[in-house]
Amino acid sequence: MRIITRTVLILSLVSLFADVASEMLYPVIPVYLEEIGFTVFLIGLLEGLASFAAGISKGYFGELSDLKGIRLPLVRAGYFLSAISKPMMAMFIYPLWVFLARTLDRLGKGIRTAPRDAILSAQATRETKGRIFGFHRGMDTLGATIGPAITLVYLYFHPQQYKTVFYFAFIPGIVSVLLLYLLKEKKIYSSTKSGNFFSFLKYWKTATPEFKKLAAGLLVFALFNSSDIFLLLKTKEITGNDNITIGAYVFYNLIFALASYPLGMWADRAGFKKVLSFGFLLFAFVYACFAFHPSVTMIFILFFIYGIYAAATDGVSKAWITNIAHDKNTATAVGFYTSLESICTLLASTIAGALWFWLGSIYTFGITAIITLAVLVYFMTAFKHH
């Protein structure tokens, strides 16, 4: 039996092209926003609100996908919104317009995430979930490696031509949408029920005890797992070099991409708990080391380990969640978890920023490492047979 089916391959290519488009802008957005008059506070507010819009919408569209029995139309709409938002950023420089463009981009992610993961889940058996989600995450992250590399090469030959990058990013973005038309979907069932925007939260009442235990542990971790920007800020602080900082980020994404499928395979064979716990241990080690002043060589070693951590947790946690959700509410389960995870991640970055500002980076990284070890102990004791 083929594990990587045509549908899984197409969805993975869609994610790769969409991530090339998004990550082409990663090195450019902060510089571009400052150039058109955004303060650091406004940039933070913009990213925060855009992420919140994406986060809270994942649950609603996950439940909608289950209730109406539709996946592909929502996936297509989500990727289209993200694609169209790229050139919008460069068209006008009014703050409200830029807010709209960034929110559309993040909202697109919110619309597509749960229905897409439900399609991936339906393409797998319980024994192949780790590999399916690992392969998808690997391709997605490969896009995150290619995107910044394209931008860095372009800006090397065309310094400060930031607006052009936004227009170029539309090309891989629209390719991702067109690829989705290679897939067809039979509408299997439909419900006349329709929930309100927050009714996905009721899923907690009907969720299995195992889902509750898993979600609780993952969300406590998410509450202290701040944005990777803090690792990049620390790298920039130590090296004083933008190229080394972006290089470290690209290197991390490359390791993440390459390790995702092998670690998914390991999870299928050894169990999700073992691989996820291994990932948490690596994460705690990386953050403990970043609490101090690692050398440039050590920074790259830590980003290598951080890539392995991401590969051991990202796809694996999604695979585990879909394995303990009922088939008819897979998207609701994914949406419920990813919505709350997004809110926790937002809070995590706020907490991390406050700790850094008031106490210094040693506390930001040190406290995160300690909490992660506590979460690791929880997983080792709460799940006996995984």
Image (cartoon, grey):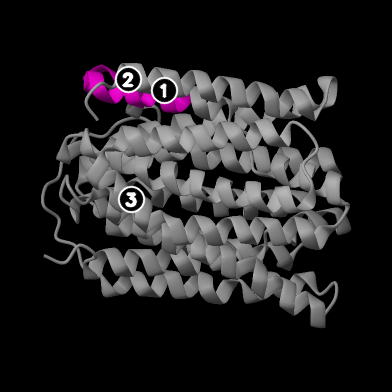
Looking at the image, do the residues carrying marks 1 and 3 touch, with CB atoms under 8 Å apart? Answer: no
Residue indicated by mark 3 = 264
Residue 314's quadrant in the figure?
Answer: top left
Looking at the image, do the residues carrying marks 3 and 2 touch, with CB atoms under 8 Å apart? Answer: no
Circle 2 packing at 10 Å, graded few (<14), some (14-19), many (20+), is some
Cα gap from disc 2 to disc 1, whole angstroms? 6 Å
Residue indicated by mark 2 = 213
Instruction: Classify residue 190 as left or right of residue 246.
Output: left
Position of residue 195 measured from the top left corner of the image (x, y, whole percent): 30, 31
Cα gap from disc 3 to disc 2, whole angstroms? 21 Å
**From where the camera sits, is residue 177 visible?**
yes
Closer mark to the observer between disc 3 and disc 2: 3
Q: Which residues are the magenta region?
A: 201-219
Residue indicated by mark 1 = 217
Residue 243's quadrant in the figure?
Answer: bottom right
Looking at the image, do the residues carrying marks 2 and 1 touch, with CB atoms under 8 Å apart? Answer: yes
Is residue 319 part of the magenta span, yes or no? no
Give the mark nearest the N terminus, 1 or 3. Answer: 1
Which residue is at a point 74% across and 22% down the rendered structure image? 363
